[in-house]
Amino acid sequence: MKATIYDVAREAGVSIAAVSQVMNGKGKISEERRGEIIKIMERLNYQPSVIASALTGKKTYTLGLLVPDISNPFFAEIARAVEDQGHHMGYSLVICSSDNKDERVERYLNLLQQKSVDAMIIGTGMDNKDMLTPLMERAIPIAMIAREMPDLDVHTVVVDDFIGGALSATHLLDLGHRRMAILAEHSKVSSSRERVRGFKSKLEEAGVGLPENRVRNCHYVVADGKREALELLGQSNPARPTALFCCNDLLAIGALQAAKQLGLRVPEDLSVIGFDNTILASVTDPPLTTVAQPIEPMGKMVVDLLIQELKKESKAKQRVVMRPELIVRQSTAAPTECD
């Protein structure tokens, strides 16, 4: 038989009201005791009726997470960090992949509203910001992660993408590179725009040019990175770049594949820098120099901000910017030819 709230209360040695308070995030119950009761719920597999809770205007203890593609290791790791923190706080997670397409974003936003999620986390790009208006009118808490929408009054947790791009450019300039190119994501992805801007700013400070045809917009998949890198590095190009800055690790892996196909050695003939420091960066051949985002702290922070709002502990929307770190591995070195 399914466990009931009475079973949880009896097992925990508390009143039914105390269990209800834990479920609703209310009451003067210590965090330690609250955690113990949540663990008992999990052990007994107690599942309150989400539908009934939604119909009565109560919390459903579910969060929605919208990402471009859960198969992208960065967003998979973001989802895991969000899920872990949500689970710790007694919330379940519904994950949707948008492929950065507005029609899918709109469909999933409607779906998540139908499921009566308590709050939504948006980690995908979108052209039509008005799609979020119905959520805001219903006072559903919203938070952006790894993306920004400056015109909207929502919580935001991001890394300083401008600094990440600047760190990458400084590293390559210090190694002696002067002919460089960028594999960027779609221009509507705010994080990619900032990474490109940060990279370009350092090159400009150093008096190093970057022709517009050496900034290539890609879909965020390995195949696109490989295709654009093959064109940039083609053997018919006498002034090929000696270094590539890639706005995510998947594009960097595509660049590594292109170099191998063209017979170019990394890092002797070509240096490659990625962004995100996903698990893939340490298993490539050679291991990838990349800009690390603090994925776990970002996931924890975005959940904490939403739960604070749900508990009415804070009305102010917060923008949290975390600092990236350049992780130097074996995919970058000084160029072997003169620029």
Image: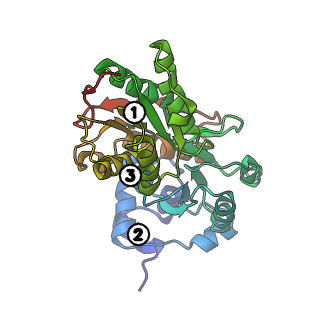
Residue nearest the viewer, comparing 271 with 276: 271
Disc 3 and disc 2: Cα gap in Å? Answer: 32 Å
Residue 60 lies, with reference to residue 310, above or below; the image says below
User: N-terminal of the two: label 1 or label 2?
Assistant: 2
**Mark 1 and mark 3 in contact (Cβ < 8 Å)?**
no
Other residues around mark 3 within 10 Å, as few (<14) / some (14–19) / many (≥20): some
Identity of the amino acid at label 3?
Answer: Glu
Disc 1 and disc 2: Cα gap in Å? Answer: 64 Å
User: N-terminal of the two: label 3 or label 2?
Assistant: 2
Q: Is residue 301 visible?
A: yes
Residue nearest the viewer, comparing 193 with 134: 193
Residue, disc 3: 77
User: N-terminal of the two: label 3 or label 1?
Assistant: 3
Residue nearest the viewer, comparing 315 with 127: 127
Query: In the image, is 25 to the left or to the right of 291?
Result: right
Disc 3 and disc 1: Cα gap in Å? Answer: 32 Å
Other residues around mark 2 within 10 Å, as few (<14) / some (14–19) / many (≥20): many
Quadrant (top left/top right/bottom left/bottom right) for the N terminus: bottom left
The picture places residue 97, in percent across and down from the top left corner, at 54, 61
Residue, disc 2: 8
Residue, disc 1: 241
Identity of the amino acid at label 1?
Answer: Pro
Quadrant (top left/top right/bottom left/bottom right) for the C terminus: top left
Residue 266 lies, with reference to residue 46, above or below; the image says above
Q: Nearer the viewer, mark 3 or mark 2?
A: 3
The picture places residue 115, in percent across and down from the top left corner, at 63, 68
Instruction: Name the residue rendered at 27%, 43% in the picture.
Output: 264
Instruction: Name the residue rendered at 52%, 63% in the picture.
Output: 94
**Mark 2 and mark 1 in contact (Cβ < 8 Å)?**
no
